[in-house]
Amino acid sequence: MECCRWTTAGTLLLASLILSSRTARSEEDRDSLWDAWGSWSECSRTCGGGASYSLRRCLSSKTCEGRNIRYRTCSNVDCPPEAGDFRAQQCSAHNDVKYQGQLYEWLPVSNDPDNPCSLKCQARGAALVVELAPKVLDGTRCYTESLDMCISGLCQIVGCDHQLGSAVKEDNCGVCNGDGSTCRLVRGQYKSQLSASKLDDTVVAIPYGSRQVRLVLKGPDHLYLETKTLQGVKSENSLSTTGFFFVENSSIDFQKFPDKEILRISGPLYADFTIKIHYAGAADSSVQFIFYQPIIHRWRETDFFPCSASCGGGYQLTSAECFDLRSNRVVADQYCHYYPENIKPKPRLQECNLDPCPASDGYKQIMPYDLYHPLPRWESTPWTACSSSCGGGIQSRSISCVEEDIQGHISPVEEWKCMYTPKMPLVQPCNIFDCPKWLAQEWSPCTVTCGQGLRYRVVLCIDHRGMHTGGCSTKTKPHIKEECVVPTPCYKPKEKLPVEAKLPWYKQAQELEEGRTVSEEPSFIPEAWSACSVTCGVGSQIRLVKCQVLLSFSQSVADLPIDECEGPKPVSQRGCYSGPCTGEATEYTPEETQLLYGSLQEFDELYDWEYEGFTECSESCGGGVQEAVVTCLNKQTREIADETLCVSSRRPPQLLKTCSLDPCPPR
């Protein structure tokens, strides 16, 4: 039996070896049908990202499995600005070739959603668009805002790591596969304040390296740019016409409208940009801005300092220094404290020079090192809190002379021992900038179309940089609403409401609810209404209304403070009717009536009673009367409507007047 068991196991082992041998041989045979891959071709471009290919030959008379060509990206360095667009170069190559017997100057047509890898060009100054070649050259970008490239007429995905087929993308800071921690989102609003002594003003300073810059000016004034390179070269651009511009190697998209200007810069900026406003009219202007600012100052850990002893065991520490990523130099620590995202690394300690000292010595040789040498030094306590949060204050600290021994123990000593170095100041000024002030914006239209109502305005707390902030005194805040009177008589009482005539309008109000989508303009975005608070009768519905903006580069939505959105905010509560309750009459409390009336007021105010002349006189002589004719009118079209549409308004009182007062002739 043992022999048989051994023979069975041996048979299984032999079978598996034969099977694996055949599999390996079949894979080897398949690979052997191909010749080795050839060398890589020359890159299709010298800059801006191109494509290179490698070929191999099928050695079999049969069909070989797999591809005979492979691609890779190459020349992944930025082209100089004067090189121009690669697709535009291919279009301009046809300028000296006649099309239908005529020469044209051809401009590129980019971002074709159907066939991005065909060479479509448009004749300058004409609507003529022609496909001049079925395929663009390898390495041409499929879309202007993407790294994807056309290879052999097909659009191939390219990640930010410049690898074909890679899905890796840049974060908002421009870091490939980054987590967004190397930059910060900056957004704010500027409002012009006309002054007889100033012709222009600074809106915002945008530092070198910033990305996804977007500014929108609304009003009669104009934007212009001032730039300063890292070498100190300054320049100015007036932004007088709509178009694309290159300013300090940064591409700028500027759009100019009669009452608005829009400035976009994808970035990164290759200079410090200062956006300014030139006053051009009597009315105020406002500018909203948003961009990603790089964190250019970061803590960097130093190397270990020299050992505290030359033998017998000592210790050494690291420290942290603030490093300027632009100039590649160490700067004062205060620059790194400006960014809350920066966390200063703690010192690391390690032992060193552990070899024993020579027997003839008997003592450790202390190395002359300033940080640990037992020379007395000034030491300060932290600064106290500033005496004022703005407008100028004072903060203080205490200074003492201390001495540190080699074990790190610190003890106070007489001040004269530290007099070899200047004593640090005991007080310093702080928070010398102006305090935040309230800034009131324009009043809204009156909330009613007749009689007495309310009007509202936005009141912002603005700091010394013109940024929306907190800290203003509530006691001095201007009022945000006031009464207003529209000099048009009202005929509709609000104390009594015939609900049975309103319910069809309420249903229509629900059906006419408009949906809104997020855009590149800050706008109010309402969420869906909640279910009605009751299952029968009159209840209420609520919803959340946010102020949001679409960030075009990252295609993400950012929430903004409510006061950064212009225009009326959609209502967040409305009445709802779920049908009559079983066994109950359709009656409502005054509160329910007011809620339902408020939700439907805009529909009711479309129709109202109006006088339309008088009837004929009841008598031809001797004195008669005429009655005023009352009709239900559509206020917008001025057309006569069915009287049921005006049932929620009080019918005007009956008016009579005398007529035909001449005496009748004797009979």
Image (cartoon, rainbow, N blue to C red):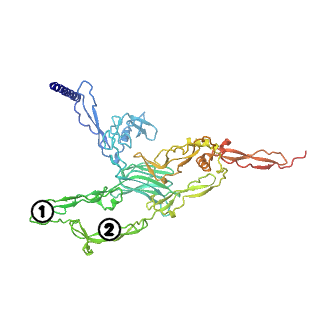
Circle 2 Cα neighbour tier, 10 Å, few/some/many (<14 / 14–19 / ≥20) = few
Which element type, helix, strand or loop, lies under badge 1?
Answer: loop
Identify the residue at horizontal 66%, vertical 45% (top origin): 646
Q: Which mark is residue 357?
A: 1
Left or right position of 470 against 5: right
Q: Position of residue 408 (x, y in %)?
A: 23, 65
Q: Position of residue 153 (x, y in %)?
A: 35, 34
Give the amino acid at mark 2: Thr
Circle 1 Cα neighbour tier, 10 Å, few/some/many (<14 / 14–19 / ≥20) = some
Observer-nearest residue: 42 or 661?
A: 661
Q: Quadrant of the N terminus?
A: top left
Give the amino acid at mark 1: Cys
Observer-nearest residue: 593 or 135?
A: 593
The single residue placed furthest to the front in the displayed view is: 1
Q: Which mark is residue 126?
A: none
- Mark nearer the N terminus (1 vs 2): 1
- The vertical placement of 61 against 532, above or below, is above
Observer-nearest residue: 101 or 318?
A: 318
Distance of mark 1 from mark 2, alpha carbons?
39 Å
Please name the residue that numbered disc 2 is placed on: 381
Q: Position of residue 237 (x, y in %)?
A: 41, 54
Left or right position of 596 against 67: right
Q: Position of residue 120 (x, y in %)?
A: 40, 37
